[in-house]
Amino acid sequence: MQKIEFAQSAQSTIGVEWEIALVNHDTADLCSVAEQVLDAVKQRDGIASDDEHPTIKPELLMNTVEIVTGVHQTVASAGEELQQNLRMLTEVTAPLGVDLYCAGSHPFAAPTQQPVTDKDRYAKLIDRTQWWGRQMVIYGVHVHVGLDSRDKALPITDGLINYQPHFQALSASSPYWGGEDTGYASQRSLMFQQLPAAGIPYHFNDWAEYEAHVGDMLHTGVIDDVSEIRWDVRPVPRLGTVEMRICDGVSNLADIKAITALTQCLVHDMSLSLEAGYKIPVMPPWFRTENKWRAARYGLDAIIILNAQGDEMLVTDHLRQEVKRLTPVAERLGCVDELHGVLNIIEDGGEYQLQRKIFAASGGDFKAVVKENVARLEGL
């Protein structure tokens, strides 16, 4: 049996990971200069070249860096740290002729021509996954929420998967892939699940069953470490968190804060329910899969399955209900304004819709799509 310890963590604390693409200022194409950018960031902050920067980190591809926050009590403070680090990153990239871009995918870059970061774990991933691995030109936002008990981790993982279509619809920002309109709101979500140990997590009845599953994957060589499980929602034992990894890349800080607040409120509400002796419903597997596909395909226009009885509702209508239901929770957590930002996303429309509008208005210019996204990031 593979024993997995779950770290101590304060309930409902949060941390955010924000994957950022590096694009050439003139061409708007991806540029693989992450090593130069990371070196410049370390030099700026007086960090040795062999050491890792605490908040700006490498990713799978050399056209990507990741901004990582520390542990925060409130969404507002996490948002402030993200903004500070983004501005610091811009100070380094601007002199290099590099812009910052964030969406679920780049609209026209050739996926298989993007160099991979020189790390053994990444080389092994590409060697094993081949064509699918070389397609992973994708960017996302991940939210960690602290749990004060290991026993909450798996039920809350199931609970967040019930909200997969909600997060997918709110963040969908990858309609284009390699210069083509895919017809989907989120191409990223369906592409990412092609990797081993990615996609929708399995349901486990208890921690021992989860440990047995991880042990089997380690024994059979599917993974070398539990961190290589890349489910859409996963427990993170070393941090004592549950990590929501569903979302496409987001270029608007207010939208990131809205998504973070929704995650924090849902986890806190589920935690209280578990403490009160309630069980979190587990959707039938095919409902979970269908909901993910519907949100990836239709975004904010998706009609989703709500429960095991098969009741359905437009995802935006259910989101409005959930924001109202969770507002008292948000009051306790100090994130009412951020939670209500979910309503702003619904009213303003999704990033995938905006990209298509810009593409049409520009006469079919993908460069204009990238430049508009870059301008929003620069304005933060």
Image (cartoon, helix red, strand yellow):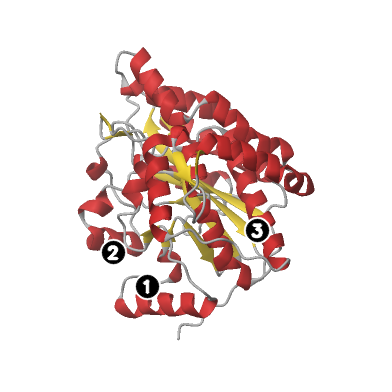
Q: Within the image, what quadrant is residue 173 found in?
A: top left
Q: Within the image, what quadrant is residue 274 found in?
A: bottom right
Q: Position of residue 247 (x, y in %)?
A: 48, 45
Q: Position of residue 160 (x, y in %)?
A: 54, 55
Residue type at mark 1 is Asp
**Residue shown at the point (56%, 30%) measured from the top left:** 345
- Return the disc, 2 or 3, that comes first in the chain's sequence: 2
Residue furthest to the right in view is 332
SS class of the residue under badge 1? loop
Disc number for residue 270:
3
Residue furthest to the bottom in view is 1
Q: Which residue is mark 1?
A: 224
Q: Position of residue 219 (x, y in %)?
A: 34, 80
Disc number for residue 124:
2
SS class of the residue under badge 2? helix
Q: Nearer the viewer, residue 301 or 310?
A: 310
Residue type at mark 3 is Met
Q: Is residue 32 above or below residue 23?
A: below
Residue type at mark 2 is Lys
